[in-house]
Image (cartoon, helix red, strand yellow):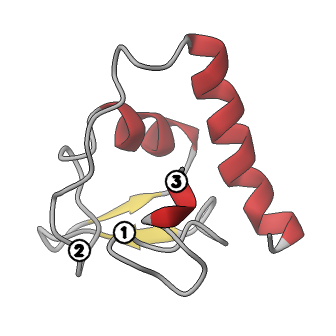
Amino acid sequence: GCMSCHPAGGGVGPDLHGLYGMTRPLADGSTVAADEEYLRESILNPNAKVADGYAPMMPSFEGQLSEDELKQLIEYIKSLNATGN
């Protein structure tokens, strides 16, 4: 699952805990608000906005998740802010 690459404290991918709502620095020097739109784009087209300090290695999940599964995943990531899980 997601946490194998995105564990608390960081791994080969950035930590997802506390991500939602923060300003995310990107590899190109710009920043982006980590909102629902950013999360959706990062899941479906992960190389569009690569997090600073990480290699563009996440696979695209476009066509692999239903719209409902995608919404559930986004809600789960958002919940990591409140629960600390």
Counting from the top left corner in percent of width and height, residue 85 is at: 80, 70
Using the numbered discs, state the Cα–Cα distance from disc 2 to disc 3 in whole angstroms.
15 Å
**SS at circle 1:** loop
- In this rendering, the answer to whether 67 lies above or below 2 is above
Residue under the image location 55 percent in, 87 percent down: 9
Report which residue position mark 2 lands on: 54
Q: Residues within 10 Å of mark 2 (few under 14, many from 20)?
A: some
Residue under the image location 71 percent in, 30 percent down: 72
Horizontally, is 62 left or right of 15 in the view?
A: left
The answer to whether the residue labelled 2 contacts the one labelled 1, judged by CB atoms less than 8 Å apart, is yes
The answer to whether the residue labelled 3 contacts the one labelled 1, judged by CB atoms less than 8 Å apart, is no
Q: Which mark is residue 70?
A: none
State which tag comes first along the sequence, 2 or 3: 3
State which tag comes first along the sequence, 2 or 1: 1
Report which residue position mark 1 lands on: 13
Counting from the top left corner in percent of width and height, residue 77 is at: 66, 52
**SS at circle 3:** helix
